[in-house]
Amino acid sequence: KRLAILASGSGSNAEKIMEHFQNSEKATVGLIASNKPDAFVLERAKKFDVPGFTFTRKEMEAGDLLRKLQAKQIDWVILAGFLLKIPEDLIRAFPDRMVNIHPALLPNYGGKGMYGMKVHEAVKAAGDAQTGITIHLVNENYDEGKIIFQAATPVSPGDSPETIAEKVHALEHRYFPEVIESIIKKES
Ligand code: GRF
């Protein structure tokens, strides 16, 4: 199976996924694509000899990203901190083959604008006793696709949004690569 990872930022999740599959016969990361030319994720791709590709939102909406994914014979698209809305034709080109990770326990704290530190600040403000990660398939309604996996971590009153973010990132790095491996194997 050939995976592409879409990321807009640092790419620590993308790195863990590239690491996990670098000597695997189950899957290969064939492309790292970003809408930010200076995203650190592109530096991480170089370390693993994975081709990088940058694009603008307009180019994505014009179909350039879809054509690139098809040219690289990508089977699965992994969103790892990708902050743009995916055009519907791109979602339809990868039915049940596009996976996103969200840094909260959906359906809580989902939806537009809920990303990164905003999520952890909301968890803190709500005084929740736990938070976690959700890995789900992407459909037209974005954070509402079929949930594949969730993991939780306790939140204590002494936690700050930053320490919550650290706990959530640890869960992401621990589970995202393995969950990807399990779903690409299961599906035809
Ligand atoms: C992660 O917290 C992920 O849940 C969210 O964006 C963040 C990406 O972090 N979608 P990184 O770029 O992989 O370090």
Image: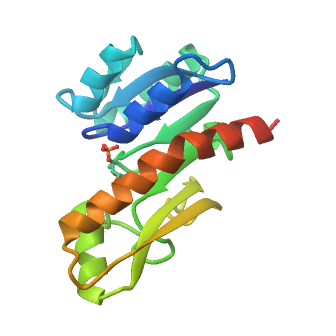
Residue located 44% across and 56% down the image: 171
Name the quadrant containing residue 35.
top left
Question: Whole-percent x and y of residue 9?
Answer: 25, 40
Residue located 34% across and 21% down the image: 45
Q: Quadrant of the C terminus?
A: top right
Q: Quadrant of the N terminus?
A: top right
Q: Nearer the viewer, residue 173 or 103?
A: 173
Instruction: Give above or below for 187 relative to 85.
Output: above
Question: Whole-percent x and y of residue 25?
Answer: 68, 17
Question: Whole-percent x and y of residue 124?
Answer: 25, 80
Residue 88 appears in the rendering: no
Side of 70 where 105 appears, left or right: left
Indicate how the structure is coloured in the image: rainbow
Residue 164 appears in the rendering: yes
Instruction: Give above or below for 60 relative to 139.
Output: above
Count of numbered marks: 0
Residue located 64% across and 28% down the image: 75
Furthest-right residue in this view: 188
Side of 166 where 86 appears, left or right: right
Question: Whole-percent x and y of residue 50?
Answer: 42, 15
Instruction: Give above or below for 56 relative to 173.
Output: above
Furthest-top residue in this view: 49
Residue located 30% across and 88% down the image: 127
Q: Nearer the viewer, residue 53 or 87?
A: 53
